[in-house]
Each structure stands twice: as structure tokens, then as C-alpha cells.
Amino acid sequence: MRDRLQFRAQVFHFFGEVEAIFGIWLVPLAVAILVMKGWSTLTSYAASIDPAEPVFVVVVMAMASSRPVLHFAEACLARVASLGRSTIAAWWLAILTVGPLLGSFITEPAAMTICALLLRQKFYDLHPSPPLRYATLALLFVNISVGGSLSHFAAPPIVMVANRWSWDLPFMLTNFGWKAVLGILVANTIYYLRFRRELAQLRPKLRKGESEQRSIPNRIIVVHLLFIAWVVLVAHYPVLVVLGFLFFLAFVEATRRYQVVTSLRGPLLVGFFLLALVIHGRIEQWWIEPVLSSLSEWPLMIGAMLLTALNDNAAITYLASLVPGFSESLKYAVVAGAVAGGGLTVIANAPNPAGQSILVSRFGDEGISAVKLFMWAILPTVIMGAAFMLLR
């Protein structure tokens, strides 16, 4: 009886996960295709789906959440925080400013995982007020979404169109990168001024055994970073990504003295969400394409921003890349809107569910309110959109 109740509890808990919703809806979709079109149509449609992005996100999340990588990222951010005497406010600014920009080089999912874990340890464990919690979460989501726009290989919405539209690293830096940095600095400064008194009152907690946890050899950190570099390099080849992950797990087992147990629950949930989103996104092409093709520059940017709140921003840019006759200004506008709107909701940007899964326990029994997140994300979203569109 106890096992049965425990099983039911786990099933209902799974149904309550945001990342599971799109996957659960695949069941009636598959049944409908099977009944109306037959088995061959179902298998043909499944074979046409590219699983590269979900597989990549699962693997890079697992690698980025390893203890050596977190130690390295914390050491880098600690140097930045030391410029502000390593106060809570200095850590807050360092994580929300430098952390998202790292996403342009270690990918957005990795940056989200690292920033969320450090925020949980350095900030959320100090029990800030609900407004500050949501303001921080909104900044994290929005900043991560735009922080990956300094390069052409890190942010999913940009990866979807970079090759098709011939956008390279110099193009991204000159057209998106510096504007993203400016927008992040402005948004962070405004929210810092709003909450500076509360941030000044927060005091760090002393953690037992913290000094022992920092004794990780540099060679192990380097190997972990090389594994992440390999996954980024072969991100579009799932077989090579999985092969690299298997070697990574073997290395973790061989050096388990300096590791912690690798938890795949969060990465697998996010991967489940992304794969389901890709499958559903293909079917939504019939209405998104006409909407995007009928808009001019500013309405297209705003429309992409709003659609991003309801769909993953990578799906928006991918579908936009299929619209014939897009001018360079329209291409820029749709990507600017999709990137700027990536923090409005949990489903707006692929790494957001990862951040939610890491931080949800710090928001109490009620979890993360979608309405409150949206409200606190409006201001930084508007700032990012204005930076992209007004500074051309």
C-alpha cells in the first residue's frame, strides 16, 4: 500500500512539473495522428524531428552543474565580486551581469545552470523578500536570453538562423552584442537602486566544510571545461554529443573523490520539455508564418516578443527563417524581439526551465508565480528591446 501511494505521489508530482506539460500533450497528439493518418505518418513525422538541441541541452546542463565547473565559475565571479568587497550586493551584480554574458561562450544552458546554482547558494538561501526574489529571477531569465547574443553559436534562437542567414561572430558582436551588454547594465542598475537597502541588509551564511570543498585540482577543472568545449563544438551532431557525455561520466566516476553525484533529473526534464516543444512547434507553423510575414519592422519585433512568451523563442526565429522574402531589417527585428522577450515566461527561452527547476524550492510551497514573473520581467524586457531597436 505504501509503495502504491508513493508511486501515485510521484506521478502527480510529475504532472505538476512545468517541463512535463508539453511532453504529456504529445500523448493525445500521437493518438490523433495514429487514428487519423496511420502508423506510417506517425513514424515519418517522428523521423523528421531533429533532436540535436534537446540532446545538447541535457548534456551541457549535466556537465555545467558538475562540481569542478561550478567551482571554476564561482572563482571567476568571485574575482568580479571582490571589486565590491564581496558583499551580497556585489555577488548579486556579478552573477546577474557577468554570468549571463558567459552564456555567449559556454552556451546559455550552461550559464543558466551556473548562475541559478550560485544565486541559490549566495542569495536565495538568505531568504530575501518576495519582490526581490521575483525581480532577481526576472533579471536572470531576461539577461540570460540576451547574454547569449554576443556569439552565433550559444543562444538557441540565434543558432536556428545563423547558418541560414550567414550571421557570424563579428556580425553578432557589432549588431547585437554591445547592445545586450548595455541593456543588461541598465536593467541591473535600475533594480539594484530599487532594492539596494535590502541587499545591504542581507548577510552571508557560514557553511561547514566550505574550505574542504574547494580543494579541486586544476587538471580536473580543465578536463571538465574541455568536455564542455567538445559538446559545444559538436552540438549539431547528437551521436558525438552523447559519446562525449559517456566519456564524461566515465571521467566523473574515475575522479569521484572530487565530484558529487551527477543528478540528471533537472537536465532530463528540460530535455523532455524541449523535445516536446520542437515536435509541437512544427505543427504551429501554419499560423505563425502568416502572422510574421504580414508585419513591418517595429510590429514584427513586438509581435515576436509577445509570441516568445507563449512559445520558445527558438521556435519563433526558426519559423521566421522559413518565411520567404525577409529583408535584413526584418530578420534583425524578429531576432531582437525573440531574444528580448526570452524572460517573460518560463517557456519563453530554452534554459528557463533549468533555472526554474534549480530555484523553485526557494519560492515556498506555492512555487513560482507566472504572473509575478511576467510583471517583474516587463521592465528589463522593454529595456532590452529598446536597446536593440533604438541603437541601430
Image: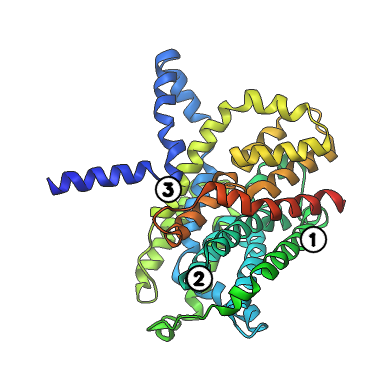
Q: Residue at x 59, y 62 (%)?
A: 136
Identify residue type, mark 2: Leu
Q: Are marks 2 and 1 in contact (CB under 8 Å)?
A: no
Residue corresponding to mark 2: 70
Q: Secondary structure at mark 1?
A: helix
Above or below 42: residue 160? below
Q: Quadrant of residue 214?
A: bottom left
Above or below 319: residue 15? below
Q: Residues within 10 Å of mark 1 (few under 14, many from 20)?
A: some
Q: Residue at x 73, y 58 (%)?
A: 150
Question: Residue 62 at what x, y percent from top left?
Answer: 45, 59
Identify residue type, mark 3: Leu
Identify residue type, mark 1: Trp
Above or below 295: residue 175? below
Q: Residue at x 81, y 28 (%)?
A: 325
State the separation of the CA atoms marked 1 and 3: 33 Å
State the separation of the CA atoms marked 2 and 3: 21 Å
Nearest to N terminus: mark 1 or mark 3: 1
Residue corresponding to mark 1: 178
Q: Which mark, by number, is residue 304?
A: none
Foreground of the two, 222 or 24: 24
Answer yes or no: is residue 76 visible.
no
Nearest to N terminus: mark 2 or mark 3: 2
Q: Residues within 10 Å of mark 3 (few under 14, many from 20)?
A: many
Nearest to N terminus: mark 2 or mark 1: 2
Residue corresponding to mark 3: 269
Q: Are marks 1 and 3 in contact (CB under 8 Å)?
A: no
Left or right, 321 with reference to 62: right
Answer yes or no: is residue 206 visible.
yes
Question: Residue 191 at what x, y percent from top left?
Answer: 67, 65
Foreground of the two, 191 or 39: 191
